[in-house]
Amino acid sequence: MDTLKNIFQQIKDFLGYRIFTLGDNEITLWKLTVFILSIILLIVATNIIVRLLKNKILPKRKLDLGMRYAIANLFRICFITIGIIIIVSTAGVDMSIVTILFGTLGIGIGFGLQSVFSNFISGIIILIEHPVKFGDRIEVGNASGNVVKISARAITILTNDNINIIVPNSDFINKEVINWSHNDKVIRFRIPIGVSYSSDVRLVEKLLLEVALENEDVLKDPASVVRFINFGESSLNFELRIWTTAQIHKQGKITSDLNFAIFEKLLQNDIKIPFPQRDLHIIQSEI
């Protein structure tokens, strides 16, 4: 019995070992262990609740995927922030000390962590205003792809080449962003075509509209149109304008499909697609 008491006493003394002092509070091994376990439990509980929000609760509210994702992430930030404050208070840490630490951290942010802080604030603005949402097709800088993740620091874009590009949140606030699916997934594409000067322009218009009607990804309403753009140096320049919802995530595919069909259609009707030509005049002079 005495041996068991000695073991418990040794464990108690070990866990009560003072690691350091924070203000008037002694931080022991036991307090530090409880603090770390509480933080881990907070993170695990937050992840479980966020998954329930995104997959079970919010879908019943008939919200779109982007809005569900934004609400879930805002909840994650608030829940973790409140949880950390409660854990620190419960641990007996003087909140005035914490205030001083946050003040010191603020100075550090001002001098050395400006970009991190800027990205964090930008992330909050994006989650509130959602100029870009989960699943949107966007272009920012040289990056183009689908939004697959929105975090506090950056947004992850998945390109058509299955490559993830991580773009800092501040880029979405400070730079021009093209969002192909922000309000409406109906997008117009413009396909330029040049034909020879000997072509029947009305026949060209008719053939281009046929190509649009024969493509299953082109919408019938709004209707496709053909515009005679200008008289080029070597060609009459037209533009086929079509509307689609099926290919906003693969702009290159519908453009390629239409170009193939246009080339074949013009070839079948003996309409030539010219190439630039130059006349070279050689003047011989007598010496």
Image (spheres, rainbow, N blue to C red):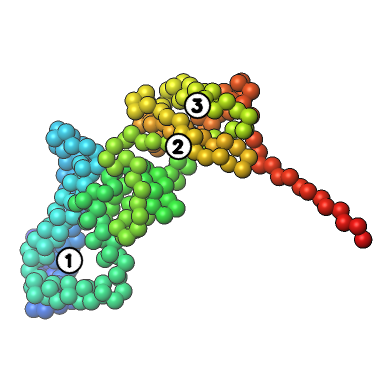
| Numbered tag placed on residue 6 in the rendering | none
Disc 2 residue type? Arg
Q: CA distance from mark 3 to mark 1?
A: 77 Å
Local secondary structure at mark 2 = strand
Is residue 213 found left or right of 85 in the rendered image?
right
Q: Earlier in the sequence, mark 3 or mark 1?
A: 1
On screen, residue 55 above or below 164: above
Residue on which the image places disc 1: 32
Q: CA distance from mark 2 to mark 1?
A: 63 Å
- Residue 20 point in image, percent of width and height: 18, 76
Viewer-nearest of labels 2 and 1? 2
Question: Which residue extends farthest front?
Answer: 286
Residue at 26% x, 49% y: name it. Answer: 131
Q: Earlier in the sequence, mark 3 or mark 2?
A: 2
Local secondary structure at mark 3 = helix
Disc 3 residue type? Glu
Residue on which the image places disc 3: 205
- Residue 7 point in image, percent of width and height: 14, 64
Depth check, front residue: 33 or 143: 143
Residue on which the image places disc 2: 190
User: Around disc 1, counting alpha carbons within 10 Å, would you say few (fewer than 14), some (14 to 19), or many (20 or more)?
Assistant: some
Q: Is residue 121 visible?
A: yes
